[in-house]
């Protein structure tokens, strides 16, 4: 009897041991498989470009935008015909800038961007152009917030790029800076199709171009998980139709975009740029691609549909929203407009 009991115990222990080993094996393999899956998942995630892993931000930001002020300083003493004669901005030139400054004091932006063509520049010697830039700078500084500058083609009709940087104390005409969860980039498209930097007072009209070295630099700045936004003077649309109909010209055409607009648009889609803002074209246009909000903004001087215009840009949860202010032709009352729809 004892032998039978011993045999039963031995068999039971063997069966129990086999069962334990079996289930331990299963559990151990499952754990190993889970670990391998986690490692593989991390490898896949790490292989995704950082710019495809955008921050889900709840951070709000406010930016003031003004463009194409095209000022031409006038002599205080009209009899003083010297080019270095002291000058000032006439009421018609400075009024929309003053209105912008007053609006910014209420809006309280984090910073301001001027999108270029600070001065008219045409036929002005460099000292007059410099004076005009200084006068606009002095007005905008009354907002007491940081100011960023893009250079326009009209600026280069009077001053050189080096002079523009010097008077505004800029290290470079291409800039990249971060504010919280956001990255902002300023570009200089004042180049011709041969990638030559546009010379001052060059008589021939150049539609603008981004040279390869600036494209390479831009890609490096866009390689981030921050929400990114681009400012430049020139437009990057693939056609020249505007958002508004010009009754006088019987068309809705605006100035041409840069030569390599398609290349830049492809980069913006690849890197998931949230928004781009340009001046220059003097026509309101909003276009939304899969990732990017494109916005062509009219200036304070030359737009017939939206004279004296300036803007509030509010970024909420990474999404840009633009409000336009302008004075309708024949009136003196500032009007507020939803930029995307153009509803007045």
Image (cartoon, rainbow, N blue to C red):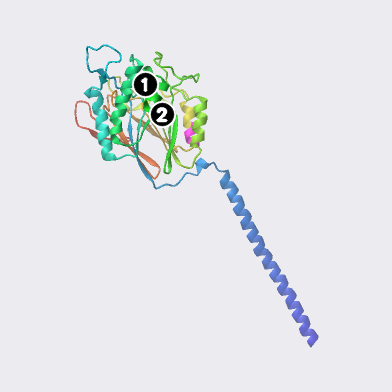
Q: Quadrant of residue 36?
A: bottom right
User: Is residue 344 at all visible to an observer of this figure?
Assistant: no
Q: Quadrant of the N terminus?
A: bottom right
SS class of the residue under badge 1?
helix
Badge 1 is on which residue? 155
**Can you say whether 19 is above or below 286 in the image?**
below
Tell me which residue sits at (30%, 40%) in the image: 108
Q: Nearer the viewer, residue 130 or 292?
A: 130
Q: Quadrant of residue 183?
A: top left
In the figure, is residue 305 to the left or right of 258? left
Residue 170's disc number = 2
Q: Nearer the viewer, residue 224 or 23?
A: 224
Q: Which residues are magenta?
A: 266-270
Q: CA distance from mark 2 to mark 1?
A: 15 Å
Magenta span main SS? helix
Q: Nearer the viewer, residue 106 or 310?
A: 106
Residue 324: x, y in percent?
29, 34
**Can you say whether 228 is above or below 57 in the image?**
above
């Amino acid at each position: 009897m004892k032998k039978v009991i011993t045999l039963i115990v031995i068999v039971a222990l063997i069966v129990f041991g086999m069962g334990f080993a079996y289930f331990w094996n299963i559990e151990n393999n499952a754990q190993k498989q889970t670990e391998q899956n986690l490692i593989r998942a991390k490898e896949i995630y790490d292989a995704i470009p950082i710019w495809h892993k955008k921050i889900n931000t709840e951070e709000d930001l406010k930016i003031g935008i003004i463009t194409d002020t095209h000022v031409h300083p006038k002599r205080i003493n009209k009899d003083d015909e010297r080019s270095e004669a002291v000058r000032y901005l006439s009421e018609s030139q400075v009024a929309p800038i003053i209105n912008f400054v007053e609006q910014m004091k209420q809006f309280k932006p984090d910073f301001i961007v001027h999108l270029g063509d600070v001065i008219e520049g045409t036929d002005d010697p460099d000292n007059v152009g410099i004076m005009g830039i200084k006068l606009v700078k002095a007005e905008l500084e009354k907002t007491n917030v940081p100011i960023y500058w893009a250079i326009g083609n009209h600026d280069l009709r009077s001053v050189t790029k080096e002079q523009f940087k010097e008077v505004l104390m800029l290290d470079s005409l291409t800039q990249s800076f971060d504010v919280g969860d956001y990255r902002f980039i300023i570009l200089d498209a004042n180049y011709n199709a041969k990638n030559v930097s546009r010379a001052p007072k060059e008589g021939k009209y150049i539609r603008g171009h981004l040279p390869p070295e600036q494209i390479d630099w831009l890609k490096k700045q866009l390689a981030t998980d921050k929400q990114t936004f681009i400012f430049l003077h020139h437009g990057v649309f693939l056609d020249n139709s505007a958002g508004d109909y010009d009754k006088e010209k019987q068309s809705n055409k605006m100035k041409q975009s840069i030569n390599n607009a398609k290349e830049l648009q492809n980069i913006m889609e690849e890197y998931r740029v949230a928004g781009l803002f340009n001046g220059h074209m003097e026509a309101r246009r909003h276009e939304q691609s899969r990732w990017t909000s494109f916005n062509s903004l009219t200036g304070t001087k030359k737009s017939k549909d939206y004279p004296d215009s300036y803007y509030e840009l509010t970024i909420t949860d990474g999404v840009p929203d633009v409000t336009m202010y302008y004075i309708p032709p024949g009136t003196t009352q500032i009007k507020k407009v939803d930029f995307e729809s153009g509803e007045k």
